[in-house]
Amino acid sequence: MPERKTIERARKDKREGKAPSTQAGEFVHEEIEHIREGKHGARSTKQAIAIGLSKARRAGVKLKPPKRGQASARTRKSAARAYRAGQSGAQRKPSAKRSRATSRALKREPRRAASKKALSTQARRAAARRRRQRASA
């Protein structure tokens, strides 16, 4: 469950008319902080970002799932599920067993995914990918 402060910041972004990706950025930021605090880890920076985006979708941010060709079928399916859950408004109690399993698995992961170096590398790669897409278009 995201922290109340994070949800408030995302709502503030929405009121200011900012893009859904900007609103979702608050949740990604929270996730990075959690890893840095040692709450849990992530296998990669990409995983940390994915967790944040999923939380954002579930919290009701209108961040559409990726289109075909942008992500794997599994990722798209998962994102679509999270998006529907956030838009439906109906809150179902999460399975305690699954939550515990996820938490324990993430606790075993390394913390280096949220390091300055890892984030910098991820940002560079994403930017390079965007440049290549623009060039081919």
Image (tube, rainbow, N blue to C red):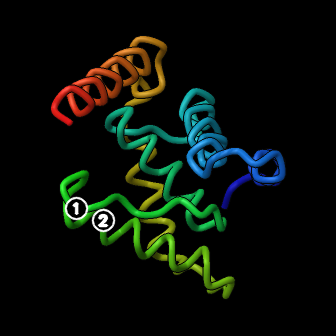
Q: Is residue 57 above or below residue 118?
A: below
Q: In which quarter of the image is residue 11?
A: bottom right
Mark 1 secondary-structure assignment: loop
Of marks 1 and 2, the one in the foreground: 1
Residue that extends furthest to the top in the rendered view of this protein: 117
Q: Distance between the residues labelled 1 and 2?
A: 8 Å
Amino acid type of disc 2? Answer: Arg
Sequence-earlier tag: 1 or 2: 1
Residue 95 in the image: state x and y as whole percent: 52, 80
On residue 97, which mark appears? Answer: none
On residue 68, which mark appears? Answer: 1
Residue 9 in the image: state x and y as whole percent: 80, 45
Task: Identify which residue is drawn at 50% across, 68% down.
Answer: 99
Observer-nearest of 8 and 70? 70
Could you tell whether 88 is left or right of 103 in the image?
A: right
Task: Identify which residue is drawn at 45% across, 38% down.
Answer: 41
Task: Identify which residue is drawn at 50% across, 52% down.
Answer: 53
Q: Is residue 122 above or below residue 48?
A: above
Observer-nearest of 102 and 6? 6
Disc 1 residue crowd, few under 14, some 14–19, many 20+, Cα 10 Å? few
Task: Identify which residue is drawn at 51% across, 41% down.
Answer: 40
Could you tell whether 83 is left or right of 89 in the image?
A: left
Observer-nearest of 106 and 24? 24
- Mark 1 touches mark 2? (CB < 8 Å): yes
Could you tell whether 62 is left or right of 10 in the image?
A: left
Mark 2 secondary-structure assignment: helix
Residue 120 in the image: state x and y as whole percent: 42, 15
Q: In this view, does 88 lie above or below 125?
A: below
Q: Mark 2 highlights which residue?
A: 76
